Image: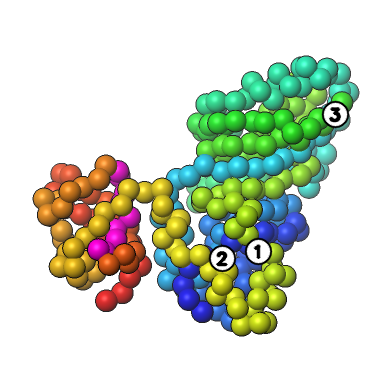
């Protein structure tokens, strides 16, 4: 099985780790990882990394995400979604126009308070571990951006929205905050990730589809080259001589090539081989290797 990425359409009631375990079993591979953990209730795009491609998991470019969400007004829970314990029920007295205005008011840059049920670490502990013990800690609002919030459908006490947002945005918190702005509260009831790491639903297979391909000996057809995830980065192309030096870990002077703008660069050989990720150190005047994907 070759190295690369397979995008899985994560089913509901599965953790991201459940999906990884299934993929390991289907492909008979040990080295499998994922990027962008999804809650069990959330479905949709989950990039799964195979073999040497797992090296990319901790250096992924910061990219936007897109979600399709549905929320219910009048109910608040401790998790801000329908899987949690109900904290309060309130009467919903909201007009269609007020609901639309409240949703649209969250477009743009926002300061969002991360939920207690999240993977953020405080003092070396995950917030969700503290929350499950009944504890709370002070959190600091974080800057997030909602580039667009499209209203797909709505009723008297619910709405379905398509959200294009920055990395680190919590959609259940967005829904909770919309409810608080309307004075009636809200909880997330459905969530589907439709874009992540540059991949969309069109790139995804279900676990059942991957199983069928593997049974036919065709699983490699589903593998996407790891370099695709770095398409958003400026490209630096090296001569054969510089390619050998780069792969050997030798320091490369920035004066040896024309440098494209960017804090990180996707490094390629003139032969069209993806070599790795590097960053220019302007102070030292050299190219710093972040990760190699090509072996000599």
Inter-mark Cα distance, 3 to 2: 37 Å
| Image vertical order of residue 83 relative to residue 30, above or below | above
**Residue at coordinates 72% horizontally, 45% vertically from top-left?**
191
* Left or right position of 116 against 53: right
Q: Which callout, 1 or 2, points at the residue further toward the start of the chain?
A: 2
Q: Is 77 or 227 nearer to us in this picture?
A: 227
SS under mark 3: loop
**Residue at coordinates 30% horizontally, 44% vertically from top-left?**
263
Asked whether 267 falls inside the magenta stretch, the response is yes
Mark 2 sits on what residue?
A: 6
SS under mark 1: strand
Determine contact: label 1, label 2, CB under 8 Å: yes
* Left or right position of 253 against 35: left
Mark 1 sits on what residue?
A: 205
Q: Which residues are magenta?
A: 262-270
State whether residue 29 appears in this view: yes
Please identify the quadrant where the C terminus is shown.
Answer: bottom left
């Amino acid at each position: 099985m070759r190295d690369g990425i397979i995008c899985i359409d994560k089913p509901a009631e599965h953790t991201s780790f459940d999906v990884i375990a299934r993929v390991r079993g289907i492909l008979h591979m040990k080295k499998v990882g994922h990027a962008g953990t999804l809650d069990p209730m959330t479905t949709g795009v989950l990039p799964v990394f195979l073999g040497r491609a797992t090296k990319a998991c901790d250096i992924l470019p910061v990219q936007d995400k897109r979600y399709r969400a549905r929320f219910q007004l009048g109910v608040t829970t401790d998790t801000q979604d329908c899987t949690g314990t109900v904290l309060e029920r309130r009467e919903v007295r909201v007009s269609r126009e007020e609901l639309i205005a409240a949703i649209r008011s969250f477009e743009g840059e926002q300061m969002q308070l991360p939920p207690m049920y999240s993977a953020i670490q405080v003092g070396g502990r995950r917030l969700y571990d503290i929350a499950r013990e009944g504890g709370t800690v002070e959190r600091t609002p974080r800057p997030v951006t909602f580039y667009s919030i499209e209203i797909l459908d709505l009723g008297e006490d619910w709405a379905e929205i398509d959200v294009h947002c920055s990395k680190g945005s919590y959609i259940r918190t967005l829904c909770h905050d919309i409810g608080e702005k309307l004075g009636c509260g809200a909880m997330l009831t459905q969530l589907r990730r439709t874009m992540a790491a540059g991949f969309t639903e069109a790139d995804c297979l279900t676990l059942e589809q991957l199983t069928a391909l593997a049974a036919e000996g065709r699983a490699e057809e589903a593998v996407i080259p790891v370099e695709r995830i770095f398409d958003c980065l400026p490209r630096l192309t090296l001569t054969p001589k510089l390619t050998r030096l780069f792969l050997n870990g030798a320091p490369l002077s920035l004066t040896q090539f024309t440098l494209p703008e960017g804090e990180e660069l996707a490094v390629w050989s003139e032969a069209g081989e993806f070599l790795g990720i590097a960053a220019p150190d302007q102070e030292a005047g050299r190219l710093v290797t972040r990760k190699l994907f090509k072996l000599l």
